[in-house]
Structure formats: structure tokens, C-alpha cells
Image (cartoon, rainbow, N blue to C red):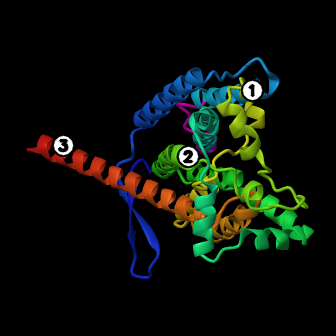
Amino acid sequence: MSGGFSTHLSADGRLQFAAVNVVPLSWIMAMLTTSTIIVMTMMAWTGLTIDFLKASNAAYLVILAVLAIIRIALGNTKSRGQMVVRDFSEYLGLFIFLSLLGATATYPAAAMTTGFVDAELARMDSLLFFNWNDWYIFVSAHPVLQQAGRLAYANIYLSPALLLGAFAMADERAKAQLFLVTFLLAATITLALFFAFPAVGPLSYLWQEPIAYMPTSGVYQAQLLPLLRGNMLGEIDLGALQGLVCAPSFHTAAAIIYIVMAWEHRQLRWPLLALNIAMLLSTPIEGTHYLVDMIGGAAVALLALAIVITLQQKISGWRENHWKAQAI
């Protein structure tokens, strides 16, 4: 399949994808290039650097280089198996790059923020009758929930690998590219909102007792944001990137995108639905998020999906009109 797709509901209520033209790969590369330039500018402005000779940073360069070599070496292959490897290498390389770029961007962005909005976020949670401390006490008392939560929270890396692998095996380049563009757009929207809603998270703001259980996200927002704002953290380690965005929750945005993108695949639909519901349930504690963070993250995902699907429909319309004009 070389075309893209738009969405509609079938008679039985299932989400269906109709073939339209794909977002051009050149557009994706242009977006990534532009994003890279913006992030590099932000880093220069805030005095942050990356030492690519450091092993933890160089490792990512090696991984990306290997994936690029595989993609180029198998560029003209006719073997179906090699085509799957080629396409998966391309998709995975692009995903790793944009994920690293997005996570890296949060560091200079954090350095540019001022103040904290935890009081407002906690107040909104109270209006929603959500008590984060009660949730934390419950998880702290059950080690099995702690282990399950850590595994579920890490699903943010498993789901995209499964999705991109399925797209490569089914020769669904359009769906892979739609997923990548949606993920990039959601990350961009999340980063933009981070400037307006910097927060240290409920573990640092609401919890006043000794920390009985340290979640995956720890208290990194409270530790790193002051250092970044004070220009006391000059180097970013790609091997030790920490989540700095509290609101909106990008784990929530990612989970919604994964569920929507997997829905058309019969083999992946229910497994990824279960995995990502588990990730959502783990997010308040493991991600140290307010409930309103998650609501915001869901809104980000839906907005990104709506924008990208509308864009593809516009591209399809433009090309259809162009073809009609040529046929006259």
C-alpha cells in the first residue's frame, strides 16, 4: 500500500481507514530538520550542549547510523522479507530520532520557564474529586502494583515498536508515516504547553510525608527545573534523559495515539488497548501526574490526530484536483 488514509466509522461502529494519499516523506524530513534547528537554537540560547563523544550519547548515534545503513542498503530490494526489514529500520530510526529530539527539547524549554502552576493543577484535581495522595498511599502499600506500574509505564516504548513492525510487515507505509507525523505534532503541542504549565508534580507538591515508594519519574522536575533555570546544568546526557513535562501528560497523549493507530489491526487492537489502559492507570503515580495533566494529554492526542487527518484529506483533495486538471 502506498497511499495514506482517512478515518470513518463502519456500520458496526469500527474505526475504518480509507485510502488517500500519504503525507510525503520529504515533508516529514523537512519537519524533523526544522525541529532540529529550533531545538539547537534553544540549546544555544540556554547554554546547553551535548557531548557526542560520551558513550551514552554516542550509542544513539551508532544505533541511528546502523538503521540508516540498513535502510539505504536495502533500498532497491525485491525480497519481501528484506523490504520489511528496510521499512522497519526506516520507521524505527525516524521514531527514535524524533523521540530523542522531543525529550531533549524539554531541557532548554524548562530553562526558559518561570514559576510553577502546581497549586492550580491541584485545585483542578480537587474539583474533579481526584485525590492523588490516596492513590499514592494505595500503590505504596502494594509492591505488586509498583512492579506492574513500572512495567506498564514503560509501554511507551513497546507499543510503537509493535505498531511500526506491523506497518512494515503489512506494507502500510502511509499508516506508519501518519503515526510518525501525529506523534511529532503531539510532542510539539505538548512542548508548547509546557511553557505555560511548568510544574514539579504531585509527589513533590502534595506529598508531605517521607517517600515510601519512589516512582519511575521520581522528583526530577523539582530537582532539574531550578538547575536549568539557573544555568547550572550545562550538558544534556541522552542516556539519562528525564521527564520534565508535568502538564500535559505526554504518556497519556501517546497512549491515545497508540490505541487509535492500532485499532484497524485485528492482531494488535486488543493487546495494545489493554497495554495502554494499563499505562494510563500507572501514569498518575509512575509519571507523578495530576489527573488534569492526563485530561490535557488526551486533548493533545485528539487535536494532533484531527490536524494530521485533516491535512491528509487536504493533500488528497489537492492531488485529485491536480489529476483532474491534467486529464482535461
The image quarter in which residue 253 lies: bottom right
| Residues marked 2 and 1 touching at CB (< 8 Å) | no
Task: Name the residue located 55 percent from the left edge and 22 percent from the top edge.
Answer: 45
- Which disc, if any, is residue 194? 2
Percent of width and height locating residue 111 = 62, 33
- CA distance separating discs 1 and 3: 46 Å
Query: Could you say which is closer to the camera, residue 181 or residue 286?
Result: 286
Secondary element under disc 1, as helix, strand or loop, is helix
Query: Could you say which is closer to the camera, residue 252 or residue 313?
Result: 252
Q: Quadrant where the C terminus lies?
A: top left
Q: Is residue 32 magenta?
A: no
**Range shown magenta:** 74-83
- The reply, left or right, for residue 276 in relation to residue 299 is right
- Sequence order check: which comes first, mark 2 or mark 1? 1
- Sequence order check: which comes first, mark 1 or mark 3? 1
**What secondary structure do most residues of the magenta stretch adopt?**
loop
Mark 3 highlights which residue?
Answer: 322
Task: Name the residue located 52 percent from the left edge and 23 percent from the top edge.
Answer: 41
Under mark 1, the amino acid is: Asn
The image quarter in which residue 72 lies: top right
- Which disc, if any, is residue 281? none
- CA distance separating discs 3 and 2: 40 Å
* Circle nearer the viewer, 1 or 3: 1
Percent of width and height locating residue 265 = 56, 65
- Which disc, if any, is residue 57? 1
Under mark 3, the amino acid is: His
